[in-house]
Amino acid sequence: MPQHDPSNWWMPFTDHRQFQHKPRIFTAAKGSFLTTDDHRQVLDITAGLWCMNLGHGRQEVADAVSQQLMQLDFAPGFQFANPQAMRYAKRICQHTPDEINKVFYTNDGSSAVDTALKMAYAWHQAKGQGTRQRFVSRMGGYHGINIGGTSMQGLANNRKGFPVLDCVDFLPHLLDIEHNAFTKGLPDHGADKADALNDIIAFRGAENIAAVIIEPIIGAGGMVPPPKGYLQKIRQICDEHGIVLIFDEVVTGFGRTGAAFAANEFGVTPDIMTSAKGITGGFVPLGAVFVKDHIYQTIVDNAPDNGPEFFHGTTYAGHPVSCAAANACLDIYEREKLFEQSGSALIQHWQDTLHSLREALPQLVDIRNYGLLGGITFAQQPRFPGNAGGAVHNTCFDRGLLCRGIGNHMVMSPPLTITTQEIDVFAATFIDAVRKTLN
Ligand SMILES: Cc1ncc(COP(=O)(O)O)c(C=O)c1O
């Protein structure tokens, strides 16, 4: 039997027929690098799955986790609290927008999304507006894999064939290569795409719409920043019609945009924000929903006596070990000023390096960036129809670079602690891999 045998593991989002021919196995990680089972160093330009914001192998997080395991390994979260969860909730609210001071813990991003959707229902019901049962999402959106999030999916493969909720309308995708190709930061064109929300409201009736859920920057749908003014417009329309605005910040939270959250960075405060991934630097699982005070208060004040006001939660919500990891990560985020990187030399270097690829690689039809996020689109490649990103991804991996190919896109989200030299290594390897694959 080989030392590592994946044959019993049904892996997530994996092409097993291809994988069984050429398993890719990681056995160790440190800083910006993963190590494979054949001892190769791979530069992790995706921060794992957009989560290892602090890089790999942080001793103080490991210490906090092991200490917490021996101090209080578990405490039920229904009707009982624990110090790590309380402390983290208090601390993180120093970084959320002013009106957002309530934290509901979940297991991951998917359960954060479904929690947020149920909170929106609950809030409207508490106000006597129970007819508001529809949602608006956006084409290209990714919102996890639970049935609520699957229903909000704007990515066809992730919803096709599943019995999704029939109560969702979709705003148009934000990718507009014709007008915005090779824009640095937020594109100028496309704020008017928010007008589609008015059309949906006119068609369905505001009294039937509970919430709009969008990623402030589209992530898995190709890493697409919002056009200037777009988020402000969505906020304004939601306000005019009493609709809850949910930002899915599972990717954009925790320093990814340069600030703590995209909401802070763009100066647009949603009513509810979902998060996960960077909350614990990816070291252990945790998710959280951050909620405006008045939403919490309305739900609590209008519930019948002698029972939970919100019949919702999971076994591991507020898990003391996960929250200990989150507290240790927040120490690092604060000490290393990783929520204050907007306009930093590092982000500037990331932008310059990404956009320098345009000259080297005629196969690219677009490069996008914001904070420490990057997106690239390849021209249609006859040899790899609709999957140039996947093809390049495989060559990158063979050459020691972990990117994420999605259709004809490549998306990047390096650890926030990446160095400028590592960014240069990324660019050189990427150029080499694209030439080798597509020439
Ligand atoms: C925007 C967004 N929402 C939700 C999720 C789901 O998070 P998880 O995989 O932790 O369940 C993801 C995961 O990539 C995401 O990108």
Image (spheres, grey):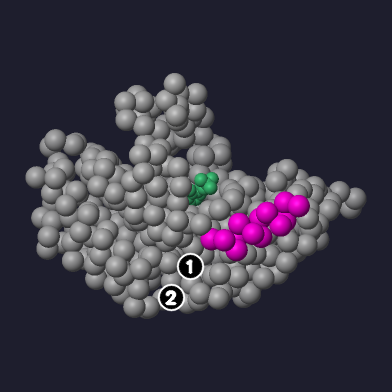
Q: Position of residue 112 (x, y in %)?
A: 60, 50
Q: Say which of 218 and 417 sits in front.
A: 417
In the rendered image, the vertical position of residue 290 relative to residue 312, given as above or below: below
Tell me which label, 1 or 2, sits earlier in the chain. 1
Badge 1 residue CB within 8 Å of ligand 1: no
Residue at 14% over, 35% down:
383
Q: Is residue 354 above or below residue 136?
A: below
Q: Is residue 64 magenta?
A: yes
Confirm whether the magenta stretch covers residue 312: no
Residue sitting at 29 percent across and 72 percent down?
Answer: 349
3D distance between C-alphas at marks 1 and 2: 8 Å
Q: Where does the magenta region start and end?
A: 58-70
Residue 106 located left or right of residue 402: right
Residue type highlighted by circle 2: Gln
Residue drawn at x 9%, y 45% is 439
Front residue of 94 and 439: 439
Q: Which residue is mark 1?
A: 255
Q: Is residue 294 visible?
A: no
* Local crowd size for mark 1, using a 10 Å CA cut-off: few (<14), some (14–19), many (≥20): many
Quadrant (top left/top right/bottom left/bottom right) for the N terminus? top left
Q: Are marks 1 and 2 in contact (CB under 8 Å)?
A: yes
Tell which of 137 and 88 is nearer to you: 88
Return the mark for residue 53. none
Q: Pointer 2: what residue?
A: 341
Q: Residue 426 at x, y = what percent?
A: 27, 58
